[in-house]
Every structure is written in structure tokens, then in C-alpha cells.
Amino acid sequence: MDELEFRRRAYANPYDNSTDFIKAARLPKNQALLIELQALDFQLTNALQEPVPAQLLDRLLAIPKGSVTPAPPRLTWRHLAIAASLTFVLGFSTRFVSFNETSSAPFSSMGQTAMAHVYAESALTQRIDEQVTLASVNAKLQPYGTQLQSLTDVGHVYYANHCLFDNGPAAHLVIQGEQQRVHVFVVPPKRTLEGVQRFSDEHYHGEVIPMDLNHLVVISEKDENIELMAAKIQASLKHAI
């Protein structure tokens, strides 16, 4: 598949799981584009779910004909956010996007890859709350042969989705820890990355835990007890039946 065909299909469906599409997504430029499109799709979906005020219809029907036109309602930050999201989508979809070559450079370890994901998606994952249920989490984990036994054991789950991790799929969960949000990646073992047990930089630290079917990568900010959260998550994970 050439780059033009990949871009066309990525814009049409950034979650395409066909064999040729996944193979093309392993190229660094294609991977960067796909991550951007998946994040954009998520932001747009949430922006368009802004509820209509419950009394709006009654108010409109109550306005008598010929009455003075009421002053336009005051715009709030929610209205501006929706407008900005739609404007960005329209502009984004009408042209190709160029990415900095260094932003898609390969990493040598799972920890480096995980931190790159967290930095790239922090604008989304630090604010989002999908009110994720156990069933929806386990639907994301099912392709990796594992399931969570209970959300009570691990904490509130803000986000559950798939992501590209070293040119292949992985599950990405965001869970409330004791102090901060904790990012959890469930990564299939067939990766070229080094599984360094502990990793950190000036903002984040984390652990890589080998499991029977996958690697569990847990990462959060420096003041979070990452060992405790990793132990909770590992204890709750089980083989899917």
C-alpha cells in the first residue's frame, strides 16, 4: 500500500484493522499520522456529545409570533470548544499534515515508547473521563487474551482504547492512582523493544512487568506509588476464557 492510499484509508477509518493497513501503519510517518487521527476522532466525538438543554424546546415553543427577537445567548467555553473542534477537523481533513521526523523516531525500550505516548496524548488523557465500565475495558483487552476481574480492585478507569506501540497494537488504559492518573499499556510480547524493568525521566516513572501473554507497562508522575498500582493491576488481570 502506498502512502497516498494509506492516508485515504486512515482519514476514512483510523481504526481500520485489515492486514495491509496494519502493515502500512508500521512505517514511522504513517504511525504518527494514525495516532493524530485517532486522537482527533476521539476529541470530535466527545465535542459533538454536548447535551441540548432540557428546557430549550419548551422555551422555543413558548415564544409568541411577532415578539421581539431575544438577544443571542452568551457563548460559554463549551460552545467555543465545540466550534474550535469542528473548525480544526474541517481544516485538518482538507490537507495532508507534515510531521517532524524526530517525533516519530523509533525507541529502544518499552519505557521510552510508553513515555512518548503519555507526552503526546497528555492534553487528551489528563482531562478525559469516559466513565468506563468493566465490560468496555474487557472488550479492549480481549484481543490480548486478558481481562480485568474488577474495577473496584484497580480504581476508576477514565479511558480505555487501542494504540500503536512499536508498530503494533496495544491496549491503553488510564486509571486513577493514589495521587495521579496512571497509564497502563498491555503490550503483546512480540516486539523489538527492550523490556527494561524500571524507567524514568524528570516527570514520569514506570515499570515493565513481563506476564504470561503480554508485557504490562505502568507509568505515572513521580509522586505516584507506581509499584502499588502495578501490583493492583497485575493481581486483577486474568486469562480470558
Image (cartoon, helix red, strand yellow):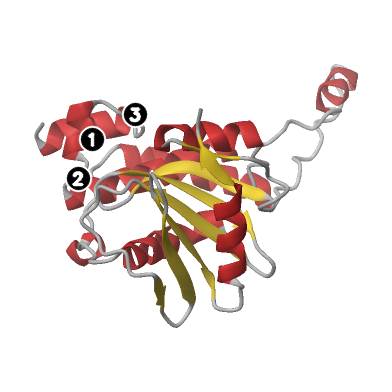
Residue located 38% across and 48% down the image: 214
Label 1 and label 3: CA atoms lie apart by: 12 Å
Q: Which residue is mark 2?
A: 26
Type of amino acid under label 1: Ile
Q: For the residue marked with disc 3, what is the amino acid?
A: Asn
Q: Residue furthest left?
A: 2
Q: Are marks 2 and 1 in contact (CB under 8 Å)?
A: yes
Residue on which the image places disc 1: 22
Q: Secondary structure at mark 3?
A: loop
Q: Residues within 10 Å of mark 1 (few under 14, many from 20)?
A: some
208 vs 5, nearest the viewer: 208
Residue 213, quarter of picture: top left
Residue at 41%, 79% in the rendered image: 201
Quarter the N terminus occupies: top left
**Cα distance in 3D space between marks 2 and 1:** 7 Å
Question: Residue 7: x and y, percent?
Answer: 21, 36
Q: State the residue at coordinates (87%, 21%).
A: 58
Q: Is residue 65 above or below residue 1?
A: above
Residue matched to label 3: 13
Q: Mark 2 or mark 3, which has the lower sequence index?
A: 3
Front one among 166 and 29: 166
Instruction: For marks 1 and 3, give the one nearer the viewer.
Output: 1
Q: Earlier in the sequence, mark 1 or mark 3?
A: 3
State the separation of the CA atoms marked 2 and 3: 16 Å
